[in-house]
């Protein structure tokens, strides 16, 4: 039913001021605005209508809703924000009916958010952890109003869209590719550029893949056609405002006129919130807003270096590597890779491993330990986290002798900048890492002689944690340092199953005679937590500390352990 503002304006204002009744009150006001188009009654009630919309704005602002179309919004409040923008659109459609100058100024202030062109929408992926993702869409400016305006304070008319590409008809509102989650916000999209038909047998370039994914995500198509005018872009709200005492003037600018430092900051902000995956371009979609945005995005080499391992496509990896322009690469994959993704990434890293600064991966079928071991020089590497799940314990025991012969004879890997090394499964990589501070070894067979040799090559070690270490007396001896000094060591933790703690005491005492650490450093024997991982938090309660009557000058350990939780026979 239509609301009578003459008698119910106060009651409607009261309902708009609370979130509980906001939705129904806004729907009633919206219905009234749509039914009384160009009526004399509407002209007489413009002051009340503008006041009610201002009340709605204040209510949403108090709830934490940022009332710009490019701002993200909590899913629970998104329907209310959509209703508010529908009210603004109806007000814009009737802007010419407002005759009072002061009411015109208030209406113009309300309509400013409609001039922005980016919508950043937060949506749930549907996973159990309810991970949030961002979706970026682009809308064109509002159509110019018919008839002359009665006020000089109205916003400037939008720049007309570029003419359609040759051989392609303009998209009508019903044909626009709107994102399902933002249906009520969408408008007809800009005309797309045309490209030369590609042969069926020709490989698709990464630029073409980007374009297809951007269109599939419901975004504007890239404006990189040389025939398009660079000035014919979407208008957006510029962050710059001119402020004088008692007055505030909001300035408007086109997307192509935004300064590079603003666009640079925008790309960095969105990249922090929305990282690309094999299923989503995420922040890469911003490079398809217009030509100037794409230029800034392609020049943001630091961001490209961070998405090196995001795509399961060789063409994409090559393009990302080229756009990184020599910036050290960061490859951090939180989950387990698919077979295809793992193969693509392993092939790419075989060529670019020297340029990697951070590598954090989990094994599917490839041995990441072997891939890194083949590299002789890793000048950029600062952090290495490898989860190489070992084979079954029985197979591990049967092949351990041969495996250690290979490991002990392997050439050293030089990583002068390496600071963090965490290895789970696989084998110990013979690093020469003078800057290494943190060493974590989990679920791999590592003889004490190899540990001592690694310690000797890493004099800056501060934290050492060792889990599931195997020592076999039948292993070939190697020339290791009789005494290893770690002057910066602050913590050493040995994770041992409680069943074997007393068994290891002689080996612990023996190793204490071979490693020198600063006075006051605690040598901790920590209960192994079954099912735990050393690649995460290692803060487990200390159950045993080496007695104080033992000399503090030579600590550490030569370890004889068994595989927990299978409790196989120790190898000695």
Image (cartoon, rainbow, N blue to C red):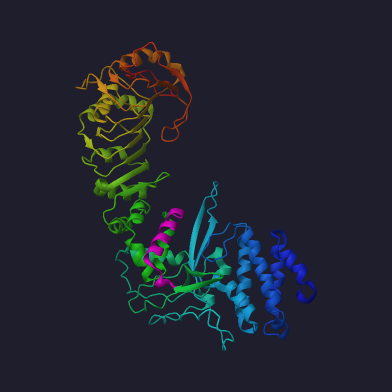
Indicate the quadrant containing the C terminus: top left, top right, bottom left or bottom right: top left
Classified by dominant secondary structure, the portion drawn in magenta counts as: helix
Where 360 sits versus 544, above or below? below
Residue 312, magenta (yes or no):
no
Percent x, y of residue 442? 38, 30
Residue 256, magenta (yes or no):
yes
> Observer-nearest residue: 155 or 305?
155
Using residue 20 as the reference point, say whether residue 280 is left or right of it.
left
Percent x, y of residue 354? 24, 46
How many dots with numbers?
0
Q: Residue furthest top?
A: 549
Q: Residue furthest bottom?
A: 147
Please give the name of the residue rendered at 24% of the width and 38% of the height, measured from the top-left corner.
Answer: 416
* Quadrant of the image occupied by residue 96: bottom right
Q: Is residue 572 visible?
A: no
Please give the name of the residue rendered at 62% of the width and 74% of the height, measured from the top-left corner.
Answer: 106
Where 442 sits versus 140, above or below? above
> Observer-nearest residue: 151 or 275?
151
Using residue 474 as the reference point, say whether residue 69 is left or right of it.
right
* Quadrant of the image occupied by residue 424: top left
> Observer-nearest residue: 340 or 445?
445
Using residue 449 as the reference point, say whether residue 208 is left or right of it.
right
Indicate the quadrant containing the N terminus: top left, top right, bottom left or bottom right: bottom right
* Quadrant of the image occupied by residue 409: top left
Please give the name of the residue rendered at 41% of the width and 75% of the height, measured from the top-left corner.
Answer: 192
Using residue 517 as the reference point, say whether residue 74 is left or right of it.
right
Percent x, y of residue 387? 37, 37
| The residue stretch that appears in magenta | 254-274
Q: Is residue 98 visible?
A: yes
Where 345 sits versus 395, above or below? below
Percent x, y of residue 33? 68, 77
């Amino acid at each position: 039913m239509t609301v009578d503002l003459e008698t119910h304006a106060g009651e409607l204002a009261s309902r708009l001021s609370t979130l509980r009744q906001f939705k129904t009150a806004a729907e009633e006001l919206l219905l009234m605005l749509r039914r009384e188009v160009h009526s004399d009654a509407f002209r007489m009630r413009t002051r009340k209508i503008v006041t009610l919309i201002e009340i709605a704005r204040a209510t949403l602002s108090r709830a934490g809703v940022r009332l710009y179309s490019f701002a993200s919004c909590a899913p629970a409040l998104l329907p209310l924000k959509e209703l508010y923008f529908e009210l603004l659109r109806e007000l814009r459609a009737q802007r010419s009916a407002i005759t009072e100058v002061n009411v015109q100024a208030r209406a113009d202030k309300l309509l400013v958010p409609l001039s922005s062109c980016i919508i950043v929408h937060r949506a749930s992926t549907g996973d159990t952890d309810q991970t949030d993702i961002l979706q970026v869409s682009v809308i064109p400016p509002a159509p110019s109003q018919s008839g002359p305006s009665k006020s000089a304070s109205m916003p400037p008319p939008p720049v007309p869209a570029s003419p359609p590409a040759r051989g392609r008809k303009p998209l009508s509102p019903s044909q626009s590719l709107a994102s399902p989650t933002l249906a009520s916000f969408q408008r007809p999209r800009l005309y797309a550029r045309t490209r030369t038909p590609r042969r069926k047998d020709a490989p698709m370039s990464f630029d073409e893949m980007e374009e297809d994914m951007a269109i599939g995500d419901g975004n504007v198509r890239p404006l990189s056609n040389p025939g398009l005018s660079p000035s014919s872009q979407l208008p957006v709200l510029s962050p710059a405002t001119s402020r004088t005492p008692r007055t505030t003037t909001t300035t408007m600018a086109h997307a192509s006129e935004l300064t590079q430092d603003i666009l640079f900051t925008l790309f960095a902000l969105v990249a922090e919130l929305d990282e690309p995956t094999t299923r989503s371009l995420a922040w890469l979609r911003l490079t398809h807003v217009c030509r100037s945005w794409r230029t800034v995005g392609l020049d943001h080499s630091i961001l490209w270096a961070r998405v090196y391992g995001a795509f399961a496509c060789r063409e994409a990896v090559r393009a990302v590597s080229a756009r990184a322009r020599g910036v050290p690469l960061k490859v951090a994959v939180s989950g387990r890779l698919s077979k295809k993704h793992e193969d693509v990434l392993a092939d790419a890293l075989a060529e670019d491993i020297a340029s990697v600064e951070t590598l954090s991966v989990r094994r599917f079928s490839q041995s990441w330990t072997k891939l890194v071991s083949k590299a002789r020089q890793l000048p950029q590497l600062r952090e290495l986290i490898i989860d190489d799940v070992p084979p079954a314990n029985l197979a591990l025991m049967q092949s351990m002798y041969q495996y250690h012969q290979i490991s002990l004879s392997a050439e050293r890997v030089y990583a002068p900048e390496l600071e963090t090394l965490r290895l789970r499964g696989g084998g110990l990589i013979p690093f020469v890492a003078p800057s290494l501070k943190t060493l974590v070894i989990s679920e791999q067979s590592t003889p004490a002689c190899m540990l001592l040799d690694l310690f000797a090559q890493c004099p800056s070690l501060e934290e050492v944690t060792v889990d599931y270490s195997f020592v076999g007396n039948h292993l070939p001896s190697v020339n290791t340092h009789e005494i290893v000094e770690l002057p910066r060591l602050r913590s050493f933790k040995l994770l041992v199953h409680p069943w074997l703690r007393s068994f290891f005491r002689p080996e612990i005492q023996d190793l204490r005679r071979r490693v020198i650490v600063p006075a006051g450093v605690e040598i901790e024997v920590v209960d192994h937590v079954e099912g735990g991982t050393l690649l995460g938090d290692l803060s487990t309660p200390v159950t045993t500390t080496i007695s104080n009557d033992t000399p503090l000058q030579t600590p550490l350990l030569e370890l004889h352990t068994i595989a927990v939780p299978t409790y196989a026979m120790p190898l000695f």
